[in-house]
Structures are given as C-alpha cells and as structure tokens.
Amino acid sequence: MVTLSYFRVVMKYLHLLCCALFLSVFGMAQKAFDFNSACVEAYQDITRLKLISGAAYINKAREQNPNNLVPVLLESYSDFYTLFLNENPAQYQTMYPLFQERLDRLQEGPESSPFYLYSQAIVRIHRAGVSVKFGHLWDAGWDFRRAYLLLKENKKLYPNFSPNDLMFGALQAVIGTVPKGYRWLVNLLGMKASLTEGMRAVRNYTNSNDPWARTFFNEAAFIYPYLLFFIENKKEEALNFVQQKKLDLVNNHLHAYMAANLALNNKETALSRSIVQNRNKSDEYLRLSVWDFQLGYAKLYHLNYNEAKYHFEQFTRQFKGKFYVKDVYQKISWCYYLQGNMKAAEEARTQVIRRGSTEADADKKALKDARELIWPNPLLLKARLLNDGGYHSEAYKLLEGKTEDNFSKPEEKLEFAYRAARIYDDLGRTDDAIRTYQIAIRMGASRKEYFASRAALQIAQIYEARGQKAMAIQYYQQCLSMEDHEYKDSLDQRAKAGIARCKGA
C-alpha cells in the first residue's frame, strides 16, 4: 500500500529530476557567442603571437561564462598559428584532432548568431592551412570547400556581418589564381571565384570603420598586404599599407613576420633585416625559427656568407617542419661554395637530398639542383644574390661588359640573358629589360629552367604597369603555355592572376 510519506518522497525525487533536466536543457540553450572584452583582449594578444597571455584571457572569459563558445574559436587561432608557423610534428599529433572537437562544440551554439556558421568556417580554414603544411592536400581541399560554402551561406543570412567579407573575399581571390596543377581540385570541389570581387571585398573591409572590422583589424592587416603583393602584384602598395596604417612591427610579431617577408620578397633587404632585428624579443611571444630564416637571406643577399650560414644553421637546428628546409640547405651549400670550401659545400648539399620535403617550389628546385651535382656559375650566382637583395647597382657592375660569349654552357648563356634583363628591369631600364627578356625567352622556351617562363611573366608585368593590357595578356599566356619547367605552379599562379587583373575578372 502506497503511503502518503512514500508519495512525498517519490514526488521529491521527481521534482529534483525535473529540475536537473530543466537545468540541463536550459544550460544547452544558453550556449552563446559573446565576444566580450576578455575575448577581445585574447584575440588581440593571439594575433600578436602573444599566445600565453592570450590563453590567460581565454581562461578569464570561460570563468565569466562557461557557456560562451568564442573561447573555443580563439583556441583554434592559437593552435593554427603555432602549427602553421612552426610545423612541429609532435604538436601536430596533439593539436590537430582538437580542430574537430572544436567544430563539434561550435555546432552546439545558437544558429541565430552570425558567429554560428562563421566560427565553423574559420576553424575549417585553420585546419586546412595546417593540412597544407603537413602534406594533406586532399583534406585541406575539402575543408576549404566547406569553409567557402559556410561563408557563402552566412553572407546570405547575415549580409551586414562584415567579417564574412574578409575571409570569403580572400578565398575568392586566391581560388581564382590556383595554378593548373591544382585546378582539378578546385573544379572537383565546385568553388567559383572572382579575383576582382574578392579583392574589392577584402579592401573595403580592411579600410572600413565597421566595429567588427576594427576588432579584427590585426587579421585583416595580415591578410590584405599578402593579397596586394602576390595576387594583385601591387608590391609598393602592400608595403605602403604597413606604413600608412602604422602597424606595430615591434610588439606585433604577426605583422612583423608579414612585413619582413614582403620586404624581403620586394628586394628591400635592409628593411626586412631592420624589422626582424628591432622586434620585441620578449619570451612572451611564440618562438619562431622564421626570424633566422629571414636574417639568413638578408645576409646572403649582401654576400655576407659567415653571418648567413650562422642564421641558416640556427634555422635548421630549431625548425621541426619540412617547408623550405631543402632550400635553406642549398643556401648553406652556396655560402661554402662561394668561399671555396667545397668539402663543406658538398656535405651541405647532401642534406638537401636527405632533409625536408618538396611541397614548395623552392624545395623542388633545390632537390633538382642537388641531384644534378652541378654547381652554379659563381659570377652569375653572386649577381643573382645581389639583385635578389635589392643591390642592383652592385649586381650590374659584376656583369658589366660581359656577353654570352663569356659563358660556355647553354644554361649559363640563358641565365646571363635573364639576369641581365632582371637587373635592367630593377634599375628602371624597362625597354632594355624587355629586349633582353625576349632573348631569354628565345633561348629557353623549350628548356626545363624557369628563366624563359619568368622572363615572359616579367615582360607582362611591365606592359601591365604601362596600361598596355592586351600586350600584357599575350605575355602572361606565353608564360602559361610553357610546360615542364621549374617553378611551374607558382609562375602559373602569378600569370593567371595577371590575366584576371587585366580582364577585370
């Protein structure tokens, strides 16, 4: 027989059970995307590569609201920078699976928030970038596709949510210039793009006074100059952006990394070296091997062999990844070679074969050269290094008075024509440059060296700068038409970007 007291006990437990269920459901319903002040501070520090203090702010945000999902997104940023920049396999094993865990957690958030799809897209972009660095291109392709679709949908749902424009625009611009070797993947994944529309979206966002654009400015100020430099070929504009926006290249290591890298690629070696050397060297920043990589090049480009070797060797000791390892060992071998130490040069060249990967074009070229067991002509090599470093007058003096007849091998005659043209180009003697580039094209169009293809690209860029777009397109297409040569993928990408710019596509 059921007594009143028994009934009361049963009702008490049922009440407690209902409360627990209610609280559970209520708790799930309260998952939120709250980009509060602690999250903003975390984002700012992480995008300066101050990851320890960034993690402290993430913990603070979690203490304030355990149901806030923005800290999940911020942790993805932190792991992405760590893995993408340092490529440590041990860290990859522990960090990479966390991207999927974060995606699962973000899907618990409110679908009514513009951050619901956006945050998932960003985590997928992070995971895709890491996958590229660790050689998983297929996985990267699918993540990029999913991110593209998520951002596309989010733009429809929340057209006024400006962060969509930065990432979706960047994807549009880059996808439109994918080289022929990877075009099948883009076609298979069904991603369509427009360089013009993508760049317009990124440019407007970066220069906007929109509150979200101001909050996420560190990220935009990192991405936009790269797109200007490599996709739109507006190199001076990219570096001017750094100055005009007064980016903090001392206390923001992400921006310092970008600016030093672009300066080095623009042959402004002294500027690159200054940025690296004057950065805040506090231990609170993510430790990067890339600083030695950049300083090694800065020293090599002015033929300071001992200092270049020191920094390159520091890089090889500290860096745990595989990108540009073969390239760096090649540069170490060149230092010894130009100093006449052939034993050490040969030892360094064996490391080109043993170490690193061939995902980057520079690494492919280094491996090819090492296997051929042929050393470059020392005069041409010195001229190349000086010219690459922006020391054009010094490079010119090395080759002044020389002709093809001073070189015996066909590949050296070809390289001489190309080097002379590049020096003319960089000295502003563009008519002489075009004439000499055309000689390089005639000599090397059917050879495997990259000189003829790059010569066509350079002529195209000269005509594009002059506003002669039809002539520019003609030479960009000539660059694309050359097959089976060094740096094929990267040169094709630049040629495709040039054609898109000239056509306004």
Image (tube, rainbow, N blue to C red):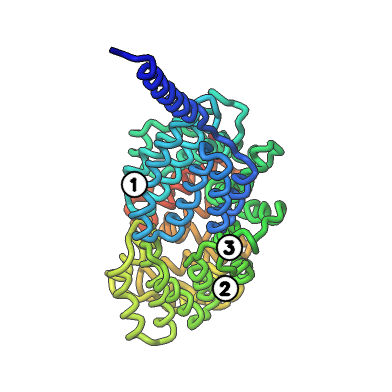
Residue drawn at x 31%, y 80% is: 347
Q: Can you identify the residue that label 1 sits on?
A: 137
Q: Residue at x 35, y 56 (%)?
A: 359
Q: Is residue 309 left or right of residue 227?
A: left
Q: CA distance from mark 2 to mark 3?
A: 25 Å
Toward the viewer: 480 or 4? 4
Quadrant in which the N terminus appears: top left
Return the residue at label 2: 396
Q: Quadrant of residue 319?
A: bottom left
In the rendered image, the vertical position of residue 387 relative to residue 4, given as above or below: below
Name the residue nearer the viewer: 484 or 95.
95
Marks 2 and 3: CB-CB under 8 Å? no
Q: At label 1, which amino acid type do we have?
A: Leu
Q: Amino acid at mark 2?
A: Tyr
- At label 3, counting other C-alpha atoms closer than 10 Å, the crowd grade (few under 14, some 14-19, many 20 or more) is many
Q: Position of residue 504 (x, y in %)?
A: 56, 35
**Residue receiving disc 3:** 260
**How far apart are the two marked residues, 3 and 1, measured between alpha carbons?**
27 Å
Q: Secondary structure at mark 3?
A: helix
Mark 2 crowd level (few <14, some 14–19, many ≥20, 10 Å Cα): some
Location of residue 317 by image quarter? bottom left
Residue at horizontal 32%, vertical 43%? 138
**Mark 2 → mark 1, Cα distance in angstroms:** 42 Å
Who comes first in sequence, dot 3 or dot 1?
1
